[in-house]
Amino acid sequence: MVLLLGGCASVQKERGHMEVAALVEERTGLKTRWNQGTPEDAQVQQHLDALLAGGLTSDHAVEVALLNNPALQGTYEELGVSQADMVQAGLLTNPSFDGSIGFPLSSEGGIEHEFSIVQSFVDLFTLPLRKRVAKEQFLADTLRVAHEALVTTAEVRQTFTEVQARQQLVALRREVLQAADAAADLSQRQRAAGNITVLALATEQAALEQARLELAQDELALVEAREHLNRLMGLYGPRVAWTLTGKLPEVPASEASLERLETRAIEQRLDIDAARKQVSLLWNALELARSTRFFGRVEVGVHTHQDANGPRLLGPTLSLELPIFDQRQALIAKLEAQHRQGEDRLMELAVNARSEVRAARAKLVTLRNMAERYQKVVLPLRTTILDESQRQYNAMQIGLPALLLARREQVEAWRAYLETVRDYWMARADLERLVGGRLPVPVSAPSPEPTPTPEPTHEHHEAH
């Protein structure tokens, strides 16, 4: 029986990874994979190239990260460590073999020898409980690894949204720069003809230089966002030349139901489930320590002995450790403290999860309302103000500074609108992370198109 129990356990590399893949796919709809240096990994690399060959989408970016993120791949290796510990907990300690031979130093007497084989006896009784503790630890580690994959998913979605927004902001800044360049060129010609003052020319030139600086800042922010996404996807070399498909999606016309999010978070958050299992395994470890506190090392075995001129003797042996000084009181006290600590940690996670979900939900609703206000009220008003300012400027009713101010305020309104939409989708990804699963995706509202920034025509001024 001892040989059978000792030979049953073995390490299976795939164990745990299938569970992680199933949990991730259930909550994201996307697949993940652990790189093990097998021929199948080459197929994964081909799949990555296919995902990056076309226009990159948010789902494609997440899938690339789940398959290729180096930090995540390193996290998957923790399952191998945990499984090895579980297998070790299911193994009996090896039996001990002792032997000795005595040779006579004179011609009198003969050879004496004795042999014994000893096995720890307590291990046989504590083996089931030790295996249960180790199995619960392995399950908790599996949940933690899956939770890390979901955290990476949320970060990728947020960074992808940042790249989309930065790309549109750069396009907007380039339009502004083109308009400012045309206006500065026109002002230069008007000044040469004596139609405008030095102040008006300097104002247009300053606006042009400011537009150049703002474009450079947004281009740098776009590069930084792309590189952040490259790190999350584990890309380098030619693979970093990916392009995006589509613009930043608009916020939904109406929000899907966000009720019972706190309850859903408590029920399906993987880190909370892992904390529950950690509390359970600490309790079982505590019970194991308590049940063996008055049993030290107990070893049973078989001993054979033969004197030089005597018969061969064979019989059982028993070795007991007397728990006089060490009754595992320190270990028990440590496990009790760790169990209470685990309960406190579980309570902290639950309280924080509820609070974070409420805050994220409020942020999501507020950002959606702000984006809707920009779309329906602020942007149309800014367009009207700019159109009227242009007409009044052409009629010489207002000066150039007033027109430039109206133009800049329209650009800043569009910038604020794009940033609000970006923040909405980033907040949504964060809320999905906090809930531990996908939220229903409502139908987005029609996307408004930025009104091209007009340049001053100076028709009336040129007439003079």
Image (cartoon, grey):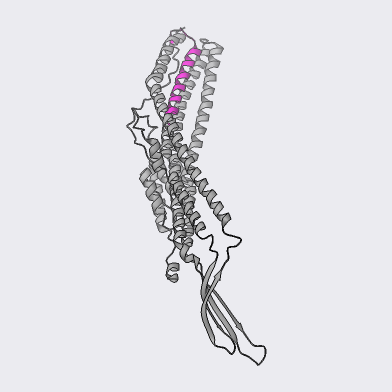
Q: Is residue 381 magenta?
A: no
Where residue 377 appears, as percent x and y from the top left, is 39, 19
Quadrant for the N terminus in the image: bottom left
Q: Who is closer to the viewer here, 317 or 445?
A: 317
Residue range in magenta is 394-422
Q: What percent of the width, then of the height, locates residue 38?
A: 42, 58
Q: Is residue 449 above or below residue 338?
A: above
In-front residue for pair 315/161: 315
- The residue located at (51%, 57%) in the rendering is 290
The structure residue drawn at horizontal position 41% and vertical position 34%, both measured from the top left corner, is: 428
Looking at the image, which residue is at 49% across and 49% down? 70
Can see residue 203? Answer: yes
Q: Nearer the viewer, residue 16 or 50?
A: 16
Task: Return the x and y of residue 212 as percentages of the image width and height.
Answer: 52, 26
Q: Specify the principal SS of the magenta part.
A: helix
| Count of numbered circles on the image | 0
Left or right of 382, for residue 213: right
